[in-house]
Amino acid sequence: MYRPVLVTGAAGFIGFHTCARLLADGRKVVGVDNLNDYYDPGLKMARREQLERQTGFSFVKADIADRAAMETLWESHGPFREVIHLAAQAGVRYSLQDPYAYIHSNCLGHLTILEMCRHTPGFRHLVYASSSSVYGGNTQTPYAVNDRVDTPISLYAATKRADELMSHSYSHLFGISQTGLRFFTVYGPWGRPDMSPYIFASAIAEGRKLPVFNHGDMKRDFTYIDDIVSGTVAALGTPPDSAKDGVPHRVLNLGNNKSVQLLDFIAEFEKAFGKKAEIELLEMQPGDVRETCADIEETTQTIGYRPTTPIGMGVPLYVTWFREYYRDKKQ
């Protein structure tokens, strides 16, 4: 019988969906989140309420960077031998405003989780969130996991690369099995309001100007949330083999393997809403990159990952949720 899985960032976008999938698979889940106000805490609370309606879910409000709180969590609900670590301070642009939040959550928080796993006898596997942002100034696409990632162009990207390096060192020193997942532009129901799908949907719904940066000359590997969760759960069940170099640590891309023009993505929102967007073309913002695309060949070979949701299917699903959720909020 498996022990509970710990999911950090459980009230976040990817964390919420990951918890829901594990629970649907019959696993017990302990979720931890500090429910901060980086964006509307009401959305986080609504996700939490959805999870608490399901059997096998327990929630703990705590900061992952708080060592004492994590020790208490391990004592009261653990020990955890499987951890999916998704808690982080997200967002490229916000890292220009509050850099300390990124070091606190993404570096100190990651270290705290590593230390807890290190001191857990029989620990099996830590799966943690990295980001496509680590590819930084790379211009050749698709991005492959063996590409150089030493030119981050935002502090957020730098902290995520730091997490990968910290994890590799802990796997080397203490034999902890770990998998870092570089997520590529995740979207879908319950998505964050600081991300482009919400910005596009809300602008079209309300008839406001829709800001499009770099004059629309941008491409993204938009990846639907269900595909991301499938890859995350598959990774958890497939710890890395340390036979090659003696270090049980790997990094994998989780993307859709299709780079989509931003204006084509917006066109799918126009179709779903049945109305045209009023587009405002703007300059590129600091920390942004022109194009992302994931090379997922190694991920497919390693954990059987195969994304199945094109934007023509995923965007209408997001818009349906958006309309229902924000209509209910207004009532």
Image: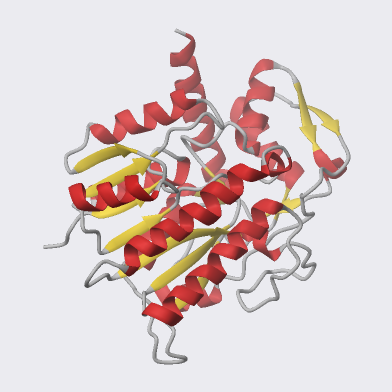
Q: Is residue 91 visible?
A: no
Judge from the rendering whether residue 287 lies leftward or rightward of residue 271; answer left or right: right
Toward the viewer: 179 or 320? 179
**Residue 126 x/y as whole percent:** 37, 65
List x then y, in percent, for residue 176. 36, 74
Viewport quadrant of the C terminus = top left
Q: Quadrant of the N terminus?
A: bottom left
Question: Residue 193's quadrant in the figure?
Answer: top right
Residue 275 or residue 76, whichever sits in front: 76
Q: Quadrant of residue 101?
A: top right
Residue sitting farthest toward the top = 331
Q: Residue at x 67, y 69 (%)?
A: 143
Q: Tell me the colour scheme of the image.
A: secondary structure
Is residue 225 something one can see in this rendering? yes
Q: Is residue 218 above or below residue 192?
A: below
* Rendered residue at 44%/74% (across/down): 170
Answer with left or right where residue 146 lies relative to residue 152: left
**In-image side of 274 versus 111 (left or right):** right
Residue ID at (46%, 41%): 13
Q: Residue furthest bottom?
A: 244
